[in-house]
Image (cartoon, rainbow, N blue to C red):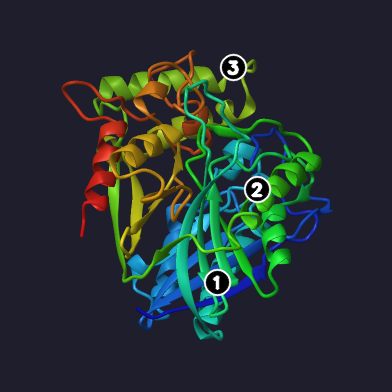
Amino acid sequence: MVFEVATQKIDITPAAGYPMAGYGADAPRLAVGTNRPLFARCTIIWNDGTPFALVTVDVLGFRQDTHDQIRSGVVGLGIATERFVLTATHTHNGPVLTTGLDPFIAYDLENLTSVGTYTTWLAATVVTLVAQTKTAPRTSCTLDYVVLDEDFSFNREGLPYAERDVPCLVARAADGTPRAVLFGYGAHPVAAGAQTTFDPDYPGPAIDAVEREWDGCFAQFLTGPAGDQNPVATGSFDDVEGFGGDLGATIVDSIGAPGRELSGPVAAAMRYVALPLDVALTPLNVAEVRADYARRAGNSGIVGYARRHALRMTQLIDATPLTALERTVSLPVQKWTIGGETPLEMLFSGGEVVSGFAVVIRGEYGGSDRVWFLAYSNDVPAYIPSDELLASPTYAGGFDADFPGIAGGSMAVYDHWAHFSRSTPLSDGVEQTYLAALRGLLDTV
């Protein structure tokens, strides 16, 4: 089986004065400059002449409309939709987009002129990046895979899962040197905390460490199931350099020699799953929900994004016919299977997926050696919480103690009017629906 690889990157850093994304605030956080530049990176793996394109962008995440715009442009380049993946590093010191977290709810940002211009430019730039990579010189290569270990992530929701996997897919030139390295880790890129300069967080120095080691090597970071995972320390660029340097050293120290060979072929599949919200579309219930939002909107003692979300939800309910209110959240799930004596399944999920789902799927399908579980892929419409997190009010679970029947926490900043439903003996909630979709995708030949 013949493999070739091509790589490119484009600087996407906005100018000083542009609003920054990642932390809810009652006034926009405007950048005063750049600590490290932000990039969109593209790796295309050619399998017997067929391109498989993977793009990673240093932004918080893409919502469906921007993702669809980019995907349509890439398909227009002759790359089949299932062979294209768009991911976000989820840095919390990147640019605000028109879609992502709602700019008004999350950041009290109402003038979106510059944001709209930048978002349009970014979508077109990502398509241009793929086009440039598709026509760039290719290197004949082999592919190999190894899972390394890091330990700076912890479960911020108090659950017993902590991500340790550092999956690495290496494309090697004929002399065995790494030409391209795709690697990941399941920790929120929030080591820096809320800063006023653009920065890709710990993936940045990790990428730099890998690219310094081998002349001409290209590195690309892919965020794992980090919805409930944080670095053990946050708040400074020293933390960024420390964690990123450690991660980079782990990779450099371990991939000089090949891991498990992947001989191909490469296959791809993609589908969407409708995740159920906990809603009852009756006039009485919707009226009660609106009343709860009206009370929350007038409560000056709660966080600003919750008040702004509540205001928007009362407006939404007033303007939307009952039957048109949101009942499900659409989530893309995708996989690439790279064949070999022991194949690798690269599982790309939309959303901010919590780590417990990866624990279940890896346990059922042969562990991390067989399944690389990735999140923040294609669309990021919400956190994807487990039943454990839906058992009581939590930020990741998407509801608060004051009004547990309506959206709160993460579902508020992601502008939904309800939170996800918990699985019961009588109905599948988000956990069972989501796991069934992942299993169905992985079982697809």
Residue drawn at point x = 63 percent, y = 23 percent: 303
Which mark's residue is nearer the viewer, 1 or 3? 1
Q: Mark 2 and mark 3 in contact (Cβ < 8 Å)?
A: no
Q: Mark 1 and mark 2 in contact (Cβ < 8 Å)?
A: no
Count up the numbered dots: 3
Q: Is residue 324 above or below residue 337?
A: above
Q: Give the Cα separation between the discs numbered 2 and 1.
A: 32 Å
Q: Is residue 386 above or below residue 95?
A: above
Element under disc 2: helix
Residue behind mark 1: 124
Task: List the single residue furthest toward the left.
Answer: 426
Q: Give the Cα separation between the discs numbered 3 and 2.
A: 44 Å
Residue 272 in picture, x, y percent from top left: 29, 52
* Earlier-in-chain disc, 3 versus 2: 2
Element under disc 1: helix
Callout 1, which amino acid? Answer: Ala
* Earlier-in-chain disc, 1 versus 3: 1
Callout 3, which amino acid? Answer: Asn
Residue behind mark 2: 247
Residue 138 in picture, x, y percent from top left: 52, 83
Residue 29 makes an appearance in the image: no
Residue 60 makes an appearance in the image: yes
Callout 2, which amino acid? Answer: Leu
Residue drawn at point x = 42 percent, y = 54 percent: 64
On the image, which quarter does residue 45 sit in?
bottom left
The answer to whether 331 appears left or right of 119 in the picture is left
Q: Is residue 431 above or below residue 175?
A: above
Rendered image: mark on residue 299: 3
Please rate how many residues cluster around mark 2, counting C-alpha atoms within 10 Å: few if below 14, some from 14 to 19, many from 20.
many
The answer to whether 151 appears left or right of 142 in the picture is right
